Amino acid sequence: MMRSIRLAILALLLAAGPAAAQDRLPLEAFVGTWSGTGIAEDDDSLFFAVTARDLDIVIRPEGDGFRIDWTTLIRSGGDPANPDVRRRSASLVLQPAGRPGLYRAPESGDPLQGGTMSWARIHGNTLSLYQLVLNDEGGYELTNYDRTLTDLGMESVFQRIRDGEIVRVVRGRLVKTGS
């Protein structure tokens, strides 16, 4: 009986190892054009209204890796019928980093020299993009974009963390609008 239990546990442990890699979605699952909306929260959200955002993301193959373009349309302040609108766009090319599910931006800079270090990883059904910069005093700012595929589309969570403190979180939902 004990031998059977040990064999069953061993079989489960052996199956669990490779399963982690098998559970990681391929990059192709994230490829496409995604559009949706989000809400930004920060410390002031307790006292002031949250800000609405329109989110657009395009992920497409490029070389051995992929290119990601994202645009955020921010509506805040001003007349509610005619709010102030700001548009932020960014693009990044990421290439395989030599480990499964890990990508790096070839143009990444050295944060100690004032550059931005950018990398991405796929874990489970989430594509995460990270960008790290240091300020003049050696403090850091890390931005993290988690884009998680769901049965209904994509959930997006953006976090800006400064010296260990969460400064802003934007949560959104997007649907695939093109391939």
Image (cartoon, rainbow, N blue to C red):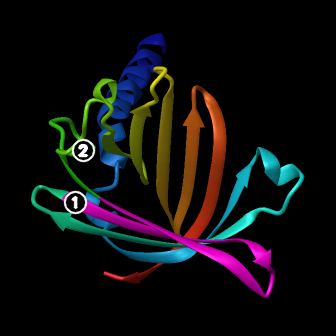
Q: Which residue is mark 1?
A: 66
Residue 130 appears in the figure: yes
Tell me which residue sits at (48%, 51%) in the image: 145
Q: Quadrant of residue 26?
A: bottom left
* Image coords of residue 116 (percent x, y): 33, 39
Mark 1 belongs to which amino acid? Answer: Phe
Q: Which residue is mark 2?
A: 103
Q: Residue furthest front?
A: 136
Instruction: Read off the magenta span.
Output: 66-91
* Image coords of residue 174 (percent x, y): 53, 73
Q: Residue furthest bottom?
A: 81
Q: Residue furthest top?
A: 2
Query: In the rendered structure, does residue 79 fall within the stretch colored magenta?
Result: yes
Tell me which residue sits at (57%, 71%) in the image: 86
Mark 2 belongs to which amino acid? Answer: Tyr
Which secondary structure class fits the magenta region best? strand
Above or below, 159 against 51 in this view is above
